[in-house]
Amino acid sequence: MSTKVNSAEQVALRANKAALAAQRRVDAESALKALRAEQDAVRERTDRLRALRLAKEADDAAAAAAKAALPATGGKPAKKKARSAQ
């Protein structure tokens, strides 16, 4: 029966591989965290801009409705007609 004896060099190589794998995991977690932070920032900016756009569209619609309510006198209120005496 033969047993395999690990040399110091093989142990060092395994330790090195384990350290590299651990470093890759740390790097991957860091990159994923940065990616998620960027996605959150983009989502927040998008939500803010959407809210601004919707508010502007609501203001524009209200202004258009107010303008449509005025008579067609170039935006000036119509003059009242004088009553005729009967």
Image: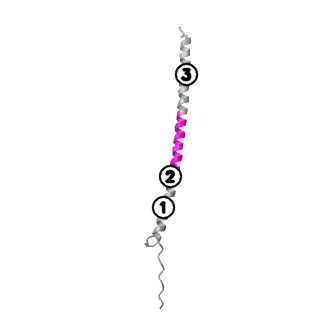
Which is closer to the viewer, label 2 or label 3? 2
Residue 55 in magenta? Answer: no
Amino acid at circle 3: Ala
Image height check: is 45 above or below 29? below
| Residue, disc 3 | 18
Judged from the image, the secondary structure of the residue bearing numbered disc 1 is helix
Q: How far apart are marks 2 and 3 (CA)?
A: 48 Å
Question: Quick one: 36 or 75, which is closer to the camera?
Answer: 75
Judged from the image, the secondary structure of the residue bearing numbered disc 3 is helix
| Residue, disc 2 | 50
- Dominant SS type (magenta): helix
What's the residue at 53%, 27% (across, down)?
24
From the viewer's perspective, is 4 left or right of 71? right
Residue 74's spot in the image, x, y percent? 43, 70
Image height check: is 18 above or below 49? above
Question: Quick one: 8 or 58, which is closer to the camera?
Answer: 58
Residue 33's spot in the image, x, y percent? 55, 36
In magenta, the rendered stretch is: 31-51
Mark 2 vs 1, N-terminal side: 2
Which is closer to the viewer, label 1 or label 3? 1
Q: How far apart are marks 1 and 3 (CA)?
A: 63 Å
Judged from the image, the secondary structure of the residue bearing numbered disc 2 is helix
Residue furthest to the bottom = 86
Residue 4's spot in the image, x, y percent? 53, 11
